[in-house]
Amino acid sequence: MPGSFKIIGLVGRSQQDGLDTVLQELLALLCERGHQVILEDRLAELVPDSEVRLGTRDEIGQQSDLVIVAGGDGSLLSAARTLAKYDTPVLGVNRGRLGFLTDITPDQIAKEVPAVLDGNYTLENRFLLEAHVVRRGEAIARADALNDVVVNSGTSANMIELELYIDDTFVYRQRADGLIASTPTGSTAYSLSGGGPIMHPMLNAIVLVPMFPHALSSRPIVVDGDSEIRMDILERNRIHPPVTCDGQVNMTARPGDSVVIRKNPYQLTLLHPLGHSFYASCRDKLRWGNALVD
């Protein structure tokens, strides 16, 4: 892949504070190096003097050799659900907070981005999940997730009762605020706050994390990443539970529906600068060892 990044897409969220400055620096760098650039059309207002091509995310995914996502992890999650199906590699520049996925900071752009463009990077493939809401045997809604799929009661005043099946094998009946199905990528996100384990991103596994379960013995379960997970919403529920993907895409289930989750056939190809370490990211972002005294 070195030297093959001729056409580069730039995407992000236009509401991000300071994104205009980052975009201007990236555009200047890329144009100076002679790359063709396609800027996401919704970002044009942030760089009004730019004369680069504009395109939708789908057009950028189809036509680019590399896509740079400028923003936080939320920006990359949003972009990943579109770009994965085009097998377009993605590089993240962080304008957010934690930045587990977008690991180049603005002050590193001038050094790290050219190095990646010259072929000095490590590559990871991250799998996504696809979730279907099934009603009377028919899928009535579908969405993808890079981090997690969450089925919850939608209100703190009610629990949801559901039955969990893995590969059509009954696991348990559960009363809880909800259930999180997370990829390894999402294990440092919402799943972590719910008491789930941190999983290395290269694992082929899915973790199922109950949210405030009624049974104190309920604990997270890690299952094979190729499993089909089915959550049956029992008829006696009186609520219509929301089904949320990456905290950004919402579907609604009814009592009697099933939520079916399986691995998406597409993967996200994520690039990191040389020297990137998942464990170093955990130490930095999660403040591991901060209380230790030398």
Image (tube, rainbow, N blue to C red):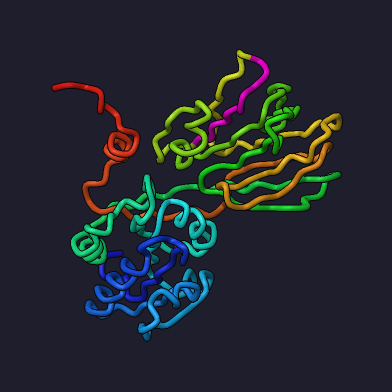
Q: Of all residues shown, which one is farthest toward the left?
A: 294
Above or below, 186 relative to 68: above
Magenta-drawn stretch contains 213: yes
Q: Nearer the viewer, residue 287 or 126?
A: 287
Q: Residue at x 45, y 56 (%)?
A: 76
Which quadrant does the N terminus fall into?
bottom left
Q: Residue at x 31, y 68 (%)?
A: 21
Q: Of all residues shown, which one is farthest toward the top?
A: 217
Q: Residue at x 38, y 77 (%)?
A: 47
Q: Nearer the viewer, residue 105 or 275?
A: 105
241 on left or right of 149: right
Q: Nearer the viewer, residue 138 or 99?
A: 99
Q: Residue at x 36, y 75 (%)?
A: 7
Above or below, 87 relative to 213: below
Q: Position of residue 22 (x, y in %)?
A: 32, 66
- Total of numbered circles in the picture? 0
Residue range highlighted in magenta = 205-215
Q: Position of residue 239 (x, y in %)?
A: 80, 36
Above or below, 213 relative to 19: above
211 on left or right of 193: right
Q: Quadrant of residue 32?
A: bottom left
Q: Position of residue 162 (x, y in %)?
A: 74, 29
